[in-house]
Image: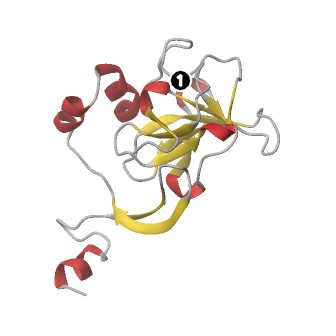
Amino acid sequence: MTSAAALALLPGTAGAAELVDVEAFDAAGKSLGVSRVERVVKSNAEWRRALSALAYEVTRHDGTEQAFTGPYWDAHDDGLFRCVCCDTALFDSKTKYDSGTGWPSFFAPISKANVAEMVDSSFGMRRTAVSCKRCDAHLGHVFTDGPKPTGLRYCMNGVALRFVARGQA
């Protein structure tokens, strides 16, 4: 192991890249396994340049797009939904369903390794926020009123996602 690689493994090392475990998927949605990759970290200015104004507000400042206005809430194409910020695979269209909420909803992420869940007590409510494990982009929330087989509803902001048709690079 090189000294730079060894340094990157030490938590709290100044200048070292933080590593996270994420599961990669090919264009067909087949798992390529879990690997340790560098967390994607950018300045606010870099995120603003890379994202639309709404995607920036949602993903970097825990915003929410208006129901029935974002992309993908009524999409039915076959493919993968990836993080708009870092391209990590997040959801497979096979788990998408019509929740009637106006946001794209899924009963499971493509891999639990690719999302982080944390308590969100904003607006006087207690919810579970969902973010991308690789870049910390806010994606939406998960609720316990979803369909079988999980009973979960991952209610995502469409602007936080990028759809890639199955088989496309």
Residue 57: percent from left, percent from top = 35, 25
Q: Which residue is mark 1?
A: 72
Q: Residue furthest front?
A: 167
Instruction: Give coordinates of residue 163: x percent, y percent.
Output: 47, 33
Placement of the C terminus among the 4 image quadrants = top left
Q: Is residue 111 above or below residue 100?
A: below
Residue 62 visible from this viewpoint: no
The image shows residue 116 at horizontal and vertical percentages of 52, 50
- The answer to whether residue 45 is left or right of residue 57 is left
- Give the residue at x 26% y 73%: 8
* Residue at the right extreme, as displayed: 148
> Image quarter for residue 94?
top right
Q: Residue furthest bottom?
A: 1
Coordinates of residue 133 in the picture (x, y in percent): 45, 52
Q: Residue at x 40, y 40 (%)?
A: 137
Q: Quadrant of the N terminus?
A: bottom left
Q: Residue at x 55, y 51 (%)?
A: 29
Nearest the viewer among 153 and 11 is: 153
Q: What is the secondary structure assignment of the residue under circle 1?
A: loop
The correct choice, above or below, for 2 with respect to 93 in the image is below
Q: State which quadrant residue 20 falls in.
A: bottom left
Looking at numbered disc 1 in the image, what kind of residue is underneath it?
Tyr
Q: On the picture, is 60 further left or further right than 76? A: left
> Which quadrant holds residue 49?
top left
**Label 1, residues with CA under 10 Å away: few <14, some 14-19, many ≥20:** many
In-front residue for pair 42/124 = 42
Query: Can residue 113 be seen in this snapshot?
Result: yes
Q: Please tell me how many numbered marks the rendered image carries.
A: 1
- Name the colour scheme: secondary structure
Left or right: residue 7 versus residue 126 is left
